[in-house]
Amino acid sequence: KQEVTQIPAALSVPEGENLVLNCSFTDSAIYNLQWFRQDPGKGLTSLLLIQSSQREQTSGRLNASLDKSSGRSTLYIAASQPGDSATYLCAVGETDSWGKLQFGAGTQVVVTP
Amino acid sequence: NAGVTQTPKFQVLKTGQSMTLQCAQDMNHEYMSWYRQDPGMGLRLIHYSVGAGITDQGEVPNGYNVSRSTTEDFPLRLLSAAPSQTSVYFCASSYSGTSGGAKTQYFGPGTRLLVL
């Protein structure tokens, strides 16, 4: 059974510092990996999706890397802002039934002014 | 487009009551799914559907039923509510794209359910 882990569970950084969020998974036979953002009391917003054949994806200040062989993905957020404060979740898409996602528990990020 | 919509936003039930959580999407997505989110546990898949008339169980299906008669709607039914079903429920949808396989998933705003 695929297990997805996100460490740390919580992170606090001063504004302007780069954020590094980690996600690890136990089974490298994945279809894709997505990073989501969740604001308190809200739904999930997709940030980046990396297909299993890709090594990274970029969108603005966000960059996500994928290393299937080591079972790791990293989300980098450059020059953090207070508006980046949220919970970030990674989710692994399984190969045996497309669309099914296995989620990590998330990393709660606070960016202080 | 409204995207993925869920109703109600909040519901209180007594143990043993039944109810239906509604989910609709207007993006013509084939794939729809239901997740529950509990503190410290991330989201867990309850049921999913790869098209109208096709549903399957996820990781935590017990106590829940689904059906998919149209592409747009995917309701989740709680048969006899239990306190363990107190959670936040999210509906999601996705399309397969021309190259096959699921693409980016879009989530609804969630339904907060409290079972007393």
Image (cartoon, coloured by chain):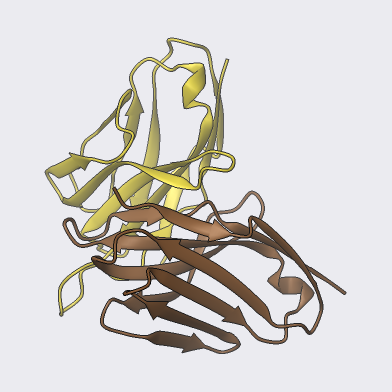
Q: Is residue A26 above or below residue A68?
A: above
Where in the figure is residue B86, as x and y percent of width and height? 53, 27
Which image quarter holds the C terminus of chain B? top right
Camera-nearest residue between B69 and B113: B113
Residue A56 found in image quarter: bottom left
Q: In this rendering, is residue B104 above or below A58?
A: above
Q: Is residue B32 left or right of residue A20?
A: left
The tint of chain A in the picture is: brown
Which residue lies at the image location 30% right of the left edge and 32% below the top edge? B61
Give the farthest residue toward the left. Answer: B53
- Residue A7's x, y, as percent? 58, 60
Residue at 28% from the left image edge and 76% from the top image edge: A52
Total residue callouts: 0
Q: Position of residue B113 (x, y in %)?
A: 53, 30
Q: Nearer the viewer, residue B43 or B27?
A: B43
Q: Of all residues shown, which one is farthest toward the front?
A: A70
Q: Residue A47 at what x, y percent from top left?
A: 50, 73
Q: Which chain is yellow?
A: B
Quarter of the image for the N terminus of chain B: give it.
Answer: bottom left
Is A32 situated left or right of A112 in this image? left
For image coordinates 11% across by 44% down, the residue present is: B53
Q: What residue sits 58% from the left and 43% below the top?
A: B40
Q: Is residue A86 visible?
A: yes
